[in-house]
């Protein structure tokens, strides 16, 4: 049973446009969310996070939006650049918990020149 | 930023042999490290939580006798795949965090294990 779902296995976006990656979760205990970026044969690298007390967090070209009522979050990348081509994983955790993160299956973002 | 080093990056072994994977936190102490496994086109699946000085906590369905975890120091955790079989072929990734829960995890670069 997938508690964190990324329903789009891949997404193709033109360079310079906005990339929007979506993530849904089912466990209402999750209250801390992270996005990781992963290149082939490498470990994921942290990108941006958001706590459930916020609905938006911005860091440069990356913005994460959280809609708690819908149990949905999204990552916006604008403008998209060729180096953004990678697999993006959405992850969730429970505040104060010592457990590892629960990941989605990832979305492969392809930036077209 | 914090660095987690994982070694080896890839390994090919014969069926029945054991393989050890090391995970080191280079610039911070990690009381907790995590081991994940990723099959092609699947998500990272948590295998076990490694706690320094105590036994690892394994996720449901993960055989603790097959995947031996040792976290002998605050900067090193090892995962040993014992009597490896082709179905153990996967991408194994460790992660560590410099503090308590709800902080960002830093990941190693992963180990691609291929069992012939």
Image (cartoon, coloured by chain):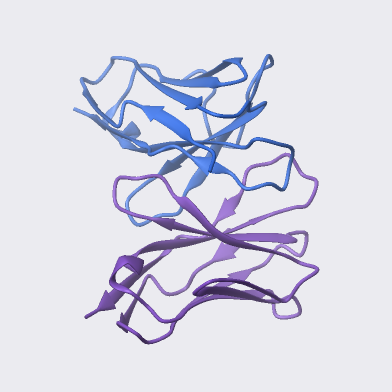
Q: Which chain is blue?
A: B
Residue B96 in the image: above or below residue A52: above
Residue A8 image offset from top left, x and y in percent: 42, 74
The one nearer the camera, B39 or B10, is: B10
Residue B63 image offset from top left, x and y in percent: 52, 26
Position of residue B91 in the picture relative to residue B28 (left or right): left
Q: How many numbered marks are there?
A: 0
Residue B109 in the image: above or below residue B82: below
Q: If the image is split into quadrants, where does the C terminus of chain B sit?
A: top left
Q: Residue at x 67, y 26 (%)?
A: B31
Can residue B78 be seen at all in this image of the molecule?
Answer: yes
Name the quadrant containing residue B15.
top left
The one nearer the camera, A112 or B90, is: A112
Name the quadrant containing residue A103.
bottom right
Residue B53 image offset from top left, x and y in percent: 68, 14
Residue B101 image offset from top left, x and y in percent: 73, 42
Q: Residue at x 71, y 62 (%)?
A: A27
Position of residue A56 in the picture relative to residue B89 (left or right): right
The one nearer the camera, B24 or A96, is: B24
Q: Residue at x 80, y 46 (%)?
A: A96
Q: Which chain is purple?
A: A
The one nearer the camera, B52 or B3, is: B3
Can residue B67 be seen at all in this image of the molecule?
Answer: no
Residue A53 in the image: above or below residue B104: below
Q: Residue at x 47, y 73 (%)?
A: A7
Name the quadrant containing residue A112.
bottom left
Residue B79 in the image: above or below residue A50: above
């Amino acid at each position: 049973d997938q508690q964190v779902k990324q329903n789009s296995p891949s997404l193709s976006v033109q360079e310079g446009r906005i990339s929007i990656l979506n993530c849904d979760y089912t466990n209402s205990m999750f209250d801390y969310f992270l996005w990781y970026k992963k290149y082939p044969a490498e470990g994921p690298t942290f990108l941006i996070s958001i706590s459930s007390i916020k609905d938006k967090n911005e860091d440069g070209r990356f913005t994460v939006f959280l809609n708690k009522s819908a149990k949905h979050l999204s990552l916006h990348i604008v403008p998209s650049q060729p180096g953004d081509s990678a697999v993006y994983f959405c992850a969730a955790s429970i505040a104060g918990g010592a457990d590892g993160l629960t990941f989605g299956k990832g979305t492969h973002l392809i930036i077209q020149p | 930023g914090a660095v987690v080093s994982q070694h080896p990056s890839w390994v090919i072994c014969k069926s029945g042999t054991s393989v050890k994977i090391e995970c080191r936190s280079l610039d911070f102490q990690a009381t907790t490290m995590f081991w994940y496994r990723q099959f092609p086109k699947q998500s990272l699946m948590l295998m076990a939580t490694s706690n320094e000085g105590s036994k690892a906590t394994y996720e449901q369905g993960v055989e603790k006798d097959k995947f031996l975890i040792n976290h002998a120091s605050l900067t090193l955790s090892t995962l040993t795949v014992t009597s490896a079989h082709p179905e153990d072929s996967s991408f194994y990734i460790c992660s560590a965090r410099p503090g308590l829960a709800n902080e960002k995890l830093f990941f190693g670069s992963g180990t691609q294990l291929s069992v012939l």
